[in-house]
Image (spheres, rainbow, N blue to C red):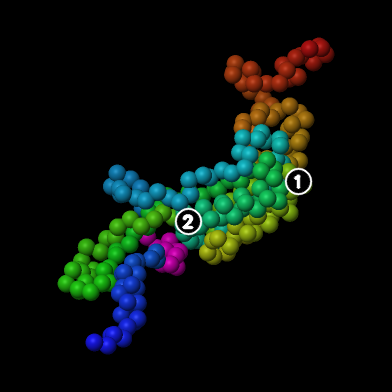
Amino acid sequence: GPPQPTRPWRTLRSRDAPRQSAMGRRPFKCYRYQKNKPYPKSRFNRGVPDPKIRIYDAGKKKYPVDVFPFAAHMVSVEKEQLSSEALEAARVACNKYMVKNAGKEAFHLRIRVHPWHVLRINKMLSCAGADRLQTGMRGAFGKTYGTVARVEIGQILLSVRARDVHKPQVLEALRRAKYKFPGRQRLCVSDNWGFTKLPRARYETLKEEGRLVKDGINVKVLAPKGRLDSRTLSKLPMSMLTPEGEEA
């Protein structure tokens, strides 16, 4: 007999059918605000997916405190939640710009918030015959879905320390990282020396007096008075241990 006419719409519908049942991730507007109590991973809350961000320091994290005097911070202006995916995206964006424009040995980037809080989802079935399987709001406590960091107004999200020469690059890298987060953030140039708590002028004064002891990327300030134990004495510079008027 004559050939049957082809019906392309049939093949298209059958090919597209599985795609409709595949669920995507929820938009983050569902989880942006701090509405629930903190819900960390614990022995009661098991089966939590690993956070997307695994590395919180990038660049030259072991460079001593003297090398990078300049520091800048990204500060949150909203009380909200930031997903581990957004934190990872911001780290990658900031790191990539700094490596490309300042050099991989010219900075130290640190992510200052950690995604401890666990999100939940009460997943509903949306396929055919779901009305017989679903229970609505019965047993509505959801399954774990992802992790977020709960941030406050004025909390530091990212910090970068570098040399003074690279100030424009640091601020541009942080500005680009801002686009990975919801809400508003502000960039601040720190008055302190690197990641220490000492203002620059105070740091330089104490350094001249020989009262600073390096402690990784931080410093310890030696008290001008009081008894010194043997461990503190061993860490003092020789200039402080020799009596006045004597040559070492």
* Camera-side mark, 2 or 1: 2
- Where residue 20 appears, as percent x and y from the top left, is 33, 72
Crowding at mark 2 (Cα within 10 Å: few <14, some 14-19, many 20+):
some
Q: Is residue 196 left or right of residue 168?
A: left
Quarter of image, res 208 = top right
Residue depicted at 63% across the width and 17% down the height: 234
Query: Magenta region's main secondary structure?
Result: loop
In the rendered image, which residue does mark 2 sit on? 85
Magenta stretch encompasses residue 144: no
- Where residue 173 appears, as percent x and y from the top left, is 65, 55
Which amino acid does the dot numbered 1 rest on? Asp
Contact between labelled residues 1 and 2, with CB atoms less than 8 Å apart: no
Quarter of image, res 107 = top right
Q: Earlier in the sequence, mark 2 or mark 1?
A: 2
Where does the magenta region start and end?
27-37
Q: Nearer the viewer, residue 224 or 169?
A: 169
Residue depicted at 44% across the width and 55% down the height: 148
- Where residue 201 appears, as percent x and y from the top left, is 76, 41
In the rendered image, which residue does mark 1 sit on? 164
- Where residue 230 appears, as percent x and y from the top left, is 60, 16
What kind of element bears circle 2? helix
Q: Is residue 173 visible?
A: yes
Spatial CA distance of label 2 from label 1 is 31 Å
